Image (cartoon, grey):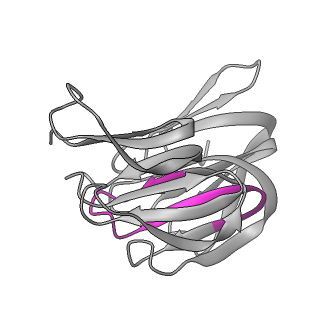
Amino acid sequence: CTRLVAVARGDWIYTSTDSGVTWTARDSARNWTAVASSSDGAKLVAVASSDQIYTSTDSGVTWTARDSGRNWTAVASSSDGTNLVAVASIDQIYTSMDSGVTWTARDSNRRWTAVASSSDGAKLVAVASSDQIYTSTDSGVTWTPHDSTRRWTAMASSSDGTKLAAVANNDQLYISTDSGVT
């Protein structure tokens, strides 16, 4: 796929159809915090701090505001762009199973900082600052805490959701090869 998407805080959403050789500014300047894409680059989702979730089904040419204004910090997408997960600081985890048209609040209010998804959207992982790592194996319906309380800042998942990487502030990189169980 040659389609790419990027966001810049206080700036625009940028899309590229030529593997990043050229970029086009889309939507408007906001405090963008994260963006995610389907594997073909057609379905996009972006979040902004103290703003809404925005979705696109045409590779970023047009955008639709979704859900309500929250302090969004991260978002992730399944490879087909149908299952989405977003987190907001001092708020809940939100999941969508219809490409972002509707959203359901999950888990408890925490200082969520990052989220990641397996390619099918079934296995999710989220981290919160001064809290634990949380995993879900049912597309976000239920969540299980793991590991120690740390100042988690970033999270990544393999396509099958079995290999996870997490980073804590002023700490180290943590790796799991069993979907976050250990």
State which quadrant residue 172 falls in. top right
The residue that appears at 66% across and 75% down in the rendered structure is 105
Image coordinates of residue 72 in percent, x first then y, are: 66, 55
- Look at the magenta stretch and give its main secondary structure: strand
157 over 61 or under it: above or below? above
**Residue 161, can we see it?**
no
The residue that appears at 58% across and 48% down in the rendered structure is 30
Of 174 and 56, nearer the camera is 56
Q: Is residue 32 found inside the magenta-colored segment of the image? A: no
Of 42 and 80, nearer the camera is 42
Tell me the quarter of the image containing the C terminus: top right
Image coordinates of residue 81 in percent, x first then y, are: 32, 63
6 over 139 or under it: above or below? above
The residue that appears at 25% across and 55% down in the rendered structure is 59
| Highlighted magenta segment, given as a residue range | 75-93
Image coordinates of residue 155 in percent, x first then y, are: 56, 39
Image coordinates of residue 176 in percent, x first then y, are: 54, 37
85 over 132 or under it: above or below? below
Tell me the quarter of the image containing the N terminus: top left
Of 132 and 26, nearer the camera is 26
Q: Is residue 164 left or right of residue 30?
A: left
Q: How many marks?
A: 0
Q: Is residue 111 left or right of residue 181?
A: right
Q: Is residue 86 left or right of residue 123?
A: right
175 over 27 or under it: above or below? above
**Residue 58, can we see it?**
yes
Q: Is residue 138 left or right of residue 110?
A: left
State which quadrant residue 143 falls in. bottom right
